[in-house]
Image (tube, grey):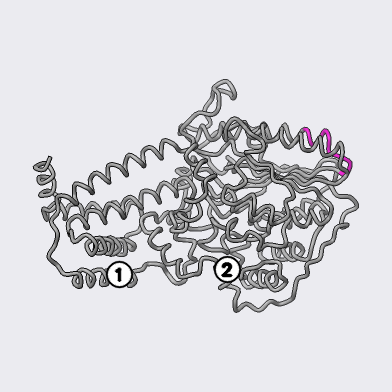
């Protein structure tokens, strides 16, 4: 064994081996990061890690191999996260997701094969590093020399830091720059952990006008029941010419006016809670920059005006039905803080697994409605989330006899995704039919919306995209989903839905169209929608958005301190 370790060590120490490994590292880093301009930064990061390990271990060759391997493993982790969730690895993931038992449980249950593969790679890397360490010889360089080398490399990291000053800080994480994202995110640690990025943007904004914490509960003659349904991972298949779906499925994305209404969201492949956050609060997740994936953690108790709080103050019973545990990304506590009186989660519903058909959740809602109407005269607002079309798509959840045998897409995973969507749409249509049959004494409004697109159609986006990174632009097709609106036993004005909407305007448009209770905040949002042409974060006159947010802040409706 000793001789074997020595022979391996002689190979690792050979200058040709180190040179070839360095050239390979350059290519792999470029593959993971997609842009050569980040490679010099990554090379210096690798050398800084090597210098730190050399400072601690006194073994130069081991430190070089260990640093290169560390950077590659982090890049691979970031690549996996981006492919699954649409947001590259951030240093805060280890604090937020890494300590979230609900999130870890779901990830392990859903992506066990990736976990096993990852653990196998980590074990192999550990064995390699042990051999490299044992086969290397301690250096005679003094501590001062080694420390000086580390400080030099650390300065190099700062000098070559590649982030553009005029580039929004979230762009790096939604663009798939997976080799550098984790190391770039370390720069975010300059903020105190409780500091909210948006506060800096609004610090010098002058609020023109003011908002009040008022509500108008009697805008319409009656208060209809309201159902807002988050349709997991769904967007209109007409956006992808590579797929063929039946006409009924295409039509299932339409509103009662026969149109498919586009909705521009701010996350791809994952981050359901970010879209739900925007719908319920009338805020843009992108306005919080790199903190966007963590809004349900950092904004708990900080948002006073929201759709559920407005309706609760006007006599509605407000219920959130979520297929995850309430503790998942802190969403249950966040939803409670913005006005939901009841949270019905995975633990309470007790499905067989996370991957049951959506009709299971619709049946839960149906029972709630039936029991509510039997003993409670209040109108009811239920916001429910579905899950069946969620990834991964390398396992068949759809029985072969559940849908016609003809494939919807030539790609196996895209086909599995679309077949799940087809069943989800059938379940939604059944729910709509029941609402139509029993609209309640004051009528019913049913809204459903896509939270984000699925990773299963990612290759279609890339193939059809013009030059550039389709994920770097929140206006691109990658962030385009839909919403649909139906009214039963009640009239609804579809004019507020005439233009394409950014997700932060959906609730304000719904309130205006359905004659729901309103408030100065949502009235201001409707005016902002019209002034910005339906665009929120990317409003052509961004000062209007900043002034609106500052008004909320000054009125105590949005606490960013």
Give the residue drawn at x 39%, y 49%.
Answer: 77
* Image location (x, y in percent) of residue 518: 80, 59
In front here: 495 or 118?
Answer: 118
Q: Earlier in the sequence, mark 1 or mark 2?
A: 1
Residue density around tag 2, few if under 14, some if 14–19, many if 20 or more, within 10 Å: some
Q: Left or right? Give the position of 438 relative to 258.
A: right
Q: Which residue is mark 1?
A: 154
Q: Which residue is mark 2?
A: 198
Q: Quadrant of residue 421?
A: top right
* Image location (x, y in percent) of residue 437: 82, 33
Looking at the rendered structure, the secondary structure element under dot 2 is helix
Q: Is residue 257 visible?
A: no
* Image location (x, y in percent) of residue 481: 60, 48
**Quadrant of the snapshot with the C terminus:** bottom right
Looking at the rendered structure, the secondary structure element under dot 1 is helix
Span of residues in magenta: 434-442
């Amino acid at each position: 064994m000793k001789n074997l370790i020595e022979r391996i060590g002689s190979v690792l120490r050979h200058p040709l081996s180190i040179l070839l490994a360095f050239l390979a590292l350059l290519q792999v880093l470029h593959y993971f990061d997609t842009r050569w301009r980040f490679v010099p930064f990554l090379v210096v990061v690798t050398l800084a890690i090597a210098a730190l390990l050399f400072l601690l271990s006194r073994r130069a060759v081991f430190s070089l191999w260990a640093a290169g391997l560390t950077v590659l493993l982090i890049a691979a982790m970031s690549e996996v996260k981006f492919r699954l969730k649409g947001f590259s690895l951030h240093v805060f993931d280890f604090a937020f997701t890494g300590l979230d038992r609900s999130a870890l449980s779901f990830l392990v249950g859903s992506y066990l094969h990736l976990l096993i593969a990852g653990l196998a790679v980590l074990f192999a890397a550990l064995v390699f590093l042990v051999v490299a360490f044992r086969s290397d010889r301690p250096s005679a360089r003094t501590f001062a020399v080694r420390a000086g080398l580390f400080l030099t490399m650390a300065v190099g990291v700062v000098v070559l830091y590649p982030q553009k000053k005029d580039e929004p800080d979230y762009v790096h994480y939604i663009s798939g720059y997976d080799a550098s994202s984790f190391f770039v995110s370390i720069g975010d640690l300059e903020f105190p952990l409780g500091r909210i990025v948006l506060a800096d943007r609004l610090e010098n904004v002058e609020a023109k006008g003011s908002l009040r914490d008022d509500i108008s509960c009697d805008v319409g003659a009656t208060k209809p029941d309201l159902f807002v349904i988050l349709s997991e991972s769904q967007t209109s298949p007409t956006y992808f010419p590579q797929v063929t779906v039946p006409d009924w499925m295409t039509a299932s994305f339409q509103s009662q006016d026969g149109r498919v209404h586009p909705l521009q969201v701010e996350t791809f492949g994952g981050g359901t809670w970010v879209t739900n956050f925007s719908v319920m609060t009338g805020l843009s997740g992108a306005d919080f920059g790199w903190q966007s994936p963590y809004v349900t953690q950092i904004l708990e108790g900080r948002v006073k005006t929201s759709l559920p709080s407005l309706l609760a103050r006007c006599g509605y019973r407000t219920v959130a039905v979520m297929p995850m545990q309430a503790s998942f990304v802190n969403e249950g506590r966040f939803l409670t803080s913005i006005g939901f009186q009841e949270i019905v989660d995975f633990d309470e519903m007790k499905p067989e697994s996370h991957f049951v058909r959506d009709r299971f959740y619709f049946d839960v809602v149906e029972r709630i409605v039936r029991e509510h109407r039997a003993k409670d005269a209040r109108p009811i607002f239920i916001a429910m989330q579905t899950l069946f079309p969620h990834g991964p798509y390398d396992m068949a959840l759809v029985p072969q006899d559940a849908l016609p045998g003809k494939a919807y897409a030539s790609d196996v995973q895209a086909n599995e995704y679309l077949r799940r969507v087809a069943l989800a749409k059938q379940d939604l249509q059944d729910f709509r039919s029941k609402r139509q049959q029993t609209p309640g004494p004051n009528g019913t409004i049913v809204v459903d919306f896509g939270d984000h697109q699925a990773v299963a159609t990612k290759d279609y986006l890339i193939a059809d995209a013009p030059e550039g990174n389709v994920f770097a632009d929140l206006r691109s097709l990658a962030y385009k989903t839909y919403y649909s609106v139906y009214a039963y036993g009640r009239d609804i004005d579809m004019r507020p839905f005439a233009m394409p909407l950014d997700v932060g305007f959906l609730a304000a448009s719904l309130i205006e169209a359905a004659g729901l209770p309103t408030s100065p905040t949502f009235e201001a949002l409707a005016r902002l929608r019209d002034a910005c042409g339906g665009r929120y974060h990317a409003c052509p006159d961004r000062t209007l958005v900043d002034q609106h947010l500052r008004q909320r802040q000054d009125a105590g409706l949005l606490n960013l301190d």
